[in-house]
Amino acid sequence: MKYVSYLFGTLSTVAAAVYLVVYLYRWEWQRAVICGVLLLAVEGFLICVILIGRMSRLERRLSDADSRVEEVRRRLEHSREESVRPFRWLGTDTREDLDGSNRTFVFVPILMVTGAALSGAAWVIQRIAAVTARPGAERRLAGRLAGLAAPPGGVRGAVLQLEDRPAVPPARPVRLLVGTFGAVAGVVLLVFGVYWLSDATETREEARPDAAATTVVFQVKVHGTSSSAARELAARDLWESCRRSTAATNTGASLGTLENGVYAGVIRPALSSHDVMRLRGCLSDAVANRARASVLGDGQAEHAH
């Protein structure tokens, strides 16, 4: 389940990031904001999953430690239980207090003298063995065991000793070169991506095309009603708010009604390709009074001859 959560979170993060860039490029700001919020939510979800996993592992470790402590405590309590004294003869009990099964008393001095005598005898035997032993026995034993010895170089060949190994690992130029190339390529791609995105979403005035006007055809639908008056009001509201989203000053902009909620907007002078993309993105993304617009097409009107 943990790996499924990681996979779902990773795919969702990648998809949200891709669509965020796409909507920014298309100048669809509301959709870009939604993708950005979704990206933050998925990242928060991944962080919560990781933290919950870490906390669960810590909880299991604490539970195991508590169980071990409890087991040790039970054993200590069991060991402190009252039992029959093993050395009753060391106590101050009188002869009458002892039961009839143990009427033989051990004298400590006798035990001490016996231990000293046995230690002395062992020392004498060890000294005699050290004096009488000869190196020949060891040589004969080594000769008999020579057939079982490993080859001089070892089974896998000669083994490098610690002093034969270099103190500093040798340099690996290929790995260093690959790592450096990957880092430089990543930085270049990041810089190029930032520059491309800023260039695609930059507000600037571009050269106008050689055309008389720019025409955009779009369809408006109002949720909950099919009234033509409501569609007309929503279409004009969308058109007036979106035609001002371009970098060019379009003082001559008119809106005409076709049929079935389809409208044609005409802007004079003609807009550049970048401004047309911004206008399309605004119309596709804007929402006014439960109304949504779908761009059907755009084009440049040629000069009349």
Image (tube, rainbow, N blue to C red):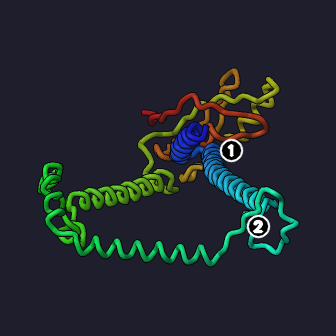
Image depth: mark 1 or mark 2 in front = 2
Label 2 secondary element: helix
Is residue 21 found left or right of 164 in the rendered image? right
Relative to 192, residue 11 above or below: above
Give the distance between the C-alpha atoms of the residues marked 1 and 2, in whole angstroms: 108 Å
Quadrant of image for the C terminus: top left
Is residue 253 found left or right of 275 in the rendered image? right
Quadrant of image for the N terminus: top right
Relative to 299, residue 101 above or below: below
* Along the viewing direction, whichever of 220 and 259 lies nearer the viewer: 220
- Sort mark 1 into few (<14), some (14-19) or many (20+) by Cα contacts within 10 Å: some
Residue drawn at point x = 60 percent, y = 75 percent: 110
Q: Position of residue 27 (x, y in %)?
A: 56, 46
Q: Position of residue 149 (x, y in %)?
A: 17, 52
Residue drawn at point x = 61 percent, y = 48 percent: 46
Q: Which residue is mark 2?
A: 88
User: Can the viewer see residue 182 in this picture?
Assistant: yes
Q: Position of residue 181 (x, y in %)?
A: 28, 58
Label 1 secondary element: helix
Whichever of labels 1 and 2 marks the residue nearer the N terminus, that label is: 2
Is residue 87 found left or right of 163 in the rendered image? right
Are dots 1 and 2 in contact, CB under 8 Å? no
Q: Amino acid at mark 2?
A: Arg
Q: Residue 240 has which mark?
A: 1
- Sort mark 2 into few (<14), some (14-19) or many (20+) by Cα contacts within 10 Å: few
* Along the viewing direction, whichever of 210 and 103 lies nearer the viewer: 103
Residue drawn at point x = 70 percent, y = 58 percent: 72
Give the farthest residue toward the top.
260
